[in-house]
């Protein structure tokens, strides 16, 4: 699945980054939800509707990218305000 190929490295990078800065803090639940949803996308039976598996994988990818996108947007706003 494409969402897993993108989401797992991002999740691992975020976990290592947050771990080196005293834990994930406010984004901890988002990281757990992302890993759970990506796992659920793989665990769902192959006979389940394809749209359901894509929706779960997309939600997992969205949760995995949320902290990274938030950091980029925060940096852009901070750079624009100076």
Image (cartoon, rainbow, N blue to C red):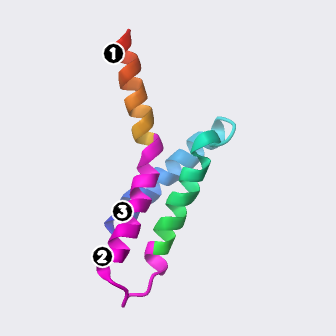
Question: What segment carries the magenta color?
Answer: 41-67
Question: How much space separates mark 3 and mark 1, taking CA atoms?
Answer: 31 Å
- Which corner quadrant holds the N terminus? bottom left
Q: Residue furthest bottom?
A: 47
Q: Secondary structure at mark 3?
A: helix
Q: Is residue 50 located in the magenta-colored stretch of the structure?
A: yes
- Which corner quadrant holds the C terminus? top left
Query: Residue 66 appears at what percent x and percent y?
Result: 44, 46
Question: How much space separates mark 3 and mark 2, taking CA atoms?
Answer: 10 Å
Decide whether the magenta segment is chiefly helix, strand or loop. helix
Query: Residue 50 appears at what percent x and percent y?
Result: 30, 80
Left or right: 64 as drawn, with respect to 53? right
For residue 61, what is the image quadrant? bottom left
Q: Which residue is labeled 1 in the image?
A: 80
Number of residues whose C-alpha sits closer than 10 Å to that of mark 3, classed few (under 14), some (14–19) or many (20 or more): many
Q: Which residue is labeled 3 in the image?
A: 58
């Amino acid at each position: 699945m494409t969402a897993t190929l993108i989401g797992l490295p991002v999740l691992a990078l975020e976990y290592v980054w947050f771990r080196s800065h005293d834990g994930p803090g406010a984004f901890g639940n988002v990281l757990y939800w992302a890993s759970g949803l990506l796992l659920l996308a793989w665990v769902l039976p192959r006979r389940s509707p394809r749209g359901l598996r894509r929706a779960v994988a997309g939600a997992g990818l969205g949760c995995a990218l949320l902290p990274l996108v938030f950091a980029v947007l925060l940096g852009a706003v901070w750079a624009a305000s100076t």
